[in-house]
Amino acid sequence: LEDKVVSVVRVPHPRIVTASWDQTARIWALTSGECTTIFCGHQRQLSSAVLSSDGEELLTASLDGTAKLWAVEGASCLRTFVGHNGGLTSAAFGPDSCEIVTSSEDHTAKIWCTPSGTCKLTLDGHASVVASASFSPDGQQVITTSHDCLTRLWCAKEGRCLRELAGHREKVLSGV
C-alpha cells in the first residue's frame, strides 16, 4: 500500500495534526510548516488523529485494531485501547476527555474510560463497518455512521440506540 495522509485536523493551537498510512501521526507548526513531533507505535495504517481540548494529549486510531492515547510533550504512549475485532476507522474525545469513542470495521463503536482504558459500552447494531463515531457537545449521545447506509444516535450512558436515520443510498462516512 502506498503511504497516504488520511486525516488532517486544524486545531485552535498554532499547529496541525495529521494521521497517515505510514503508521505515524505528526504535529506540524502552523507558522513554519515544520514537523515538530512524530508519534510511532501502531502496527498498521492510521485512520485518524485528534488532539484533546487542552492540546496536551493526542488520540490516534489505527487499522491495527487499537487506539492510542499519547502525551504530546515527549510523544510517549500513555495508554492503548484494545477490544475491537477489526481495524479502527475513527477515535474521538468526549467533551471533558474522560471518555473516548472508537469506531471499527467490526460493525461496532465502543465508549472507553480514558483514565483506566476500560471499555464502558459497546454500541452494536450496524450491519457493516462503522465509519465514524463522535460525542454530542454535551457528551450525552454518540452519533455513528456506517457503510450500511445508516446513521444512529445512541445514549452514551446506557448504550441503547435512540434513533436511526435512514435515507442515504450509499455508505455514510461521517456525521456531526
Image: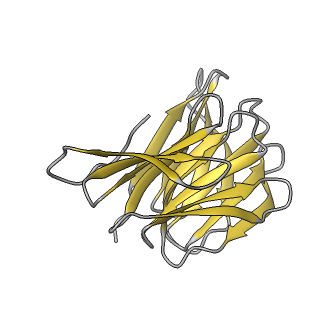
| Horizontal and vertical percent position of residue 117 | 79, 63
Residue at left offset 73%, top offset 48% = 99
**Horizontal and vertical percent for residue 152?**
41, 48
Whether residue 24 is visible: no
- Where 17 sits versus 66, above or below? above
**For this view, does 120 lie left or right of residue 29?**
right
* Residue at the image position 71 percent from the left and 58 percent from the top: 112
Position of residue 45 in the picture relative to residue 164 (left or right): right
Residue 125 locus on image (x, y percent): 42, 64
Residue at image position (68%, 48%) is 157
Residue 149, image x, y percentages: 24, 54
Q: Quadrant of the C terminus?
A: top left
Q: Quadrant of residue 11?
A: top right
Q: Residue at x 85, y 54 (%)?
A: 115
Side of 57 relative to 100 (left or right):
right
Quadrant position of the N terminus in the picture? bottom left
117 relative to 122 in the view: left or right: right
